Amino acid sequence: MLSVDVIHHPIMETFHRQGVWMAEALQRRTRSFEDFWLVASHMGDPKAAVLLVFPVVFYIHRRTGIAVLWVAALSEWLNLVLKWILFGERPYWWIGESGLFSKNPPKVQQFLSTCETGPGSPSGHAMVTSAVWWLIVSSLASFLHTRTGSKILAAVPYLLYAVFLVCVGLSRIFILAHFPHQVIAGLVTGMLLGFFLNRTVPECRPLLFFFRCSLTLLFGALVLHGVLENTGIDLSWSISLAKRWCSHSEWIRLDTAPFSSLNRDAGVLLGLGLAQYWKPGGWALAWVPRTLCLALSSMALHYISSFPLPTVPPLLFYSLFFLKYTIVPQVVMVLVPGFVHLLTAKPKRE
């Protein structure tokens, strides 16, 4: 089994060197904004699209909410495939592995969210965030233009979108999770995905469609993984480097491993199909009940997300991780709205 060594191609080495110095300069000059960068990185996390963005958008506009889950799952899955193929380094381990900084080591710091274990190219945070928020921004811009007829007002969401993406991208560089070129690649790819996938939102599709999609994502990635492994490539190379160079071993978490994102994506799509199967079209709720739905859903998803899962054996962890994210659409689309509907529905007069 061959391991993937640190790339020493002159062009890539230049990109990596400049990326490390940029991260050092960013940390030095914006140290007082550390909390801001950590929050921006958290908001760009692919799981934030499912646990934070999806409920808010769904209770405002059903179709766009469904589109958020659809695009988040497909873009994160494609990001995983690209990472397996491109073998991108991450700054926090490349600094030590390259051996180029023994005499002049950069003065950089790692953080709790730095030590992700998957390959680094392209940035998943940048890719999923740009894809998901493209849907939201384009829908909002279209709504504003239709209501006001003002192109300037309709352009405001796109301006905020650009600012948000810059913040997420810089945050990933700041915490040493990605090089700048990986962030840019993720942003561009995500925008393209958001644009094209917005035309294929699976609203009111049969359960079998989602079952097939979930299996395709799950087994498609497993087949690719098996093929790459059989060619002699050790796809666990990034996990080994993460464990070697992460400054705190407890920061290495199984939920950042590539198979965790795979099970999240497959689970979300199956859950989306089940939610539409149990209650096609959902409930027609007024704004006040919808606000209550959002509050209850947010609390429920917080407990679901923070519920600890056994990490040994790994197969049990991944199976439970799959089930956890299958539950998420049920909570937001069926269980909580159904409960609120029962509470707020006016009794019929005899």
Image (cartoon, rainbow, N blue to C red):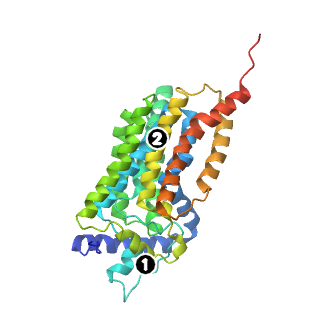
For the point 36% across and 64% down, the residue is 119
From the image, which quarter does the C terminus lie in?
top right
The residue identified by callout 1 is 244
* Nearer to me, 108 or 319: 319
SS state under label 2: helix
Horizontal side, residue 28 vs residue 122: left or right: right
- How packed mark 2 is, by other alpha carbons closer than 10 Å (few <14, some 14-19, many 20 or more), is many
Whole-percent x, y for residue 143 in the image? 48, 30
Residue at 57% across, 59% down: 309
Looking at the image, which is closer to me, 32 or 251? 251
Name the front one of labels 2 and 1: 2
Helix, strand or loop at label 1? It is: helix
Image: 31 above or below 271: below
Instruction: Where is residue 117? Give x, y as percent.
Output: 43, 66
Q: Quadrant of residue 123?
A: bottom left
Q: Which residue is mark 2?
A: 270
Q: Is residue 232 above or below residue 63?
A: below
> Camera-side residue: 61 or 224?
224
**Residue depicted at 43% across the width and 40% down the height:** 70
The amino acid type of the residue labelled 2 equals Leu
Q: Closer to the N terminus: mark 2 or mark 1?
A: 1
Instruction: Tell me if residue 288 can be seen.
Output: no
Would residue 324 be found to the left or right of residue 82 on screen? right
Residue 322 screen position, x and y as percent? 49, 50
